[in-house]
Amino acid sequence: MQVIPAINCDTEECVKKHLEMLKDIPAEWVHVDVSDGKFTPVRTWNEPELLETESLKVEVHLMVQEPEEYIERWVRAGAKRVILHIETIVGGCAPPPRGYRPCLRLNFISRWSRHCIRIIYFSTR
């Protein structure tokens, strides 16, 4: 079993404080929640360039309306996993109806799968 600590902060100071606390536990990964204030009512910290995690692998959970605007910055900053909400890549903000098989924006997925995506994990709220 793998336990992955999560960071859900709205300031850089909060992120740094939590990363400092992680130095004392044997974690391999850290999960960073990113919200844009549109997809979710809360806006969180989103400065991947300032994320300093030499010893931890980063997975980022993008709770954002337009993930295309965020992915590249997080991957460049070293994110090893990106978690998206399926409704953000099928063109709307509302969850699809039960049994609905959406036509994903395949160009979006294929663009990133060639570079960094090995697992596509879709979460719904």
Image (cartoon, rainbow, N blue to C red):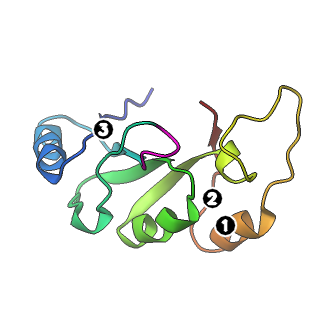
Q: What amino acid is labelled 3 in the image?
A: Asn
> Is disc 1 placed on a helix, strand or loop?
helix
Q: Range of the magenta residues?
A: 36-40
Q: Which of 1 and 11 is in front in this view?
A: 11
- Left or right, 83 with reference to 4: right
The residue that disc 2 covers is: 118
Position of the C terminus, as image quadrant, is top right
- Left or right, 54 with reference to 68: left
Q: Residue at x 38, y 38 (%)?
A: 42
Label pair 3/2, CB-CB below 8 angstroms:
no
Residue 113, disc:
1
Q: What amino acid is labelled 1 in the image?
A: Ser
The rendered magenta stretch, by its main secondary structure, is classed as: loop
Label 3 or label 2, whichever lies nearer to me, is 3
Q: Position of residue 112 (x, y in %)?
A: 63, 69
The residue that disc 3 covers is: 8
Q: Which residue is drawn at 35% across and 53% down?
A: 57
Label pair 1/2, CB-CB below 8 angstroms:
yes
Q: Which residue is drawn at 16% across and 40% down?
A: 18
